[in-house]
Image (spheres, rainbow, N blue to C red):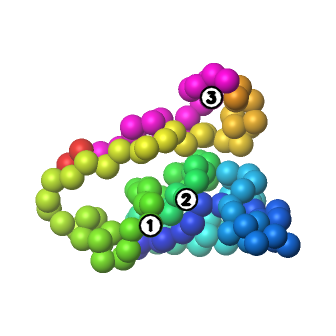
Amino acid sequence: MVARIDAPFEQNHKNYFFGLRHHEGSLAFSANDKNIEFIAKASKKHPVIVTIYLDRPAVLTPIKQYASAVVANFGVNDEVLFERLLADKPYIAKMPFALPDSMESVIKQSSDLPNDMKFLYPLGYGLTR
């Protein structure tokens, strides 16, 4: 089973033109997020590959515990995604930015020091196949 989800976001400025288009706020999924509930239930019966659209970083710790695989995507369409997942052609897939292990790590991070937080997936994490 493949679950396609988006990175979590908040829209705190809905009364403004750009505020409606801007994803901001917490990088963590809410405690009662429907996507995580679905993935948790599905993972009890089937292996679940989660592909998440990362238009911004996200805390994927709750997803990692249920998913058989986590695939980051940056706007790929279904056809290309499934071609990559199922094809037997070589490819390289590396993260262009690090993903934190928790919002607590994000909050504690110093704004002037790179790589001073705990990462779930560090910069460059990925596969070469």
At 26% from the left and 64% from the top, the residue drawn is: 84
Compared to 50, does 15 lie above or below? below
Q: Nearer the viewer, mark 2 or mark 3?
A: 2
Image quarter where the N terminus lies is bottom left
Say if the magenta span includes residue 33.
no
- How far apart marks 3 and 1 lie (CA) works out to 27 Å
Q: Amino acid at mark 2?
A: Asp
- Label 3: element kind: loop
Farthest front residue in view: 17
- Look at mark 3 in the image and give the residue it sits on: 117
Whether tag 1 and tag 2 are in contact, CB under 8 A, the answer is yes
Q: Is residue 81 left or right of residue 30?
A: left
In the rendered image, is residue 126 in sight? yes
Disc with the residue nearer the chain's start (2 vs 3)? 2
Disc with the residue nearer the chain's start (1 vs 2)? 2
Farthest right residue in view: 15
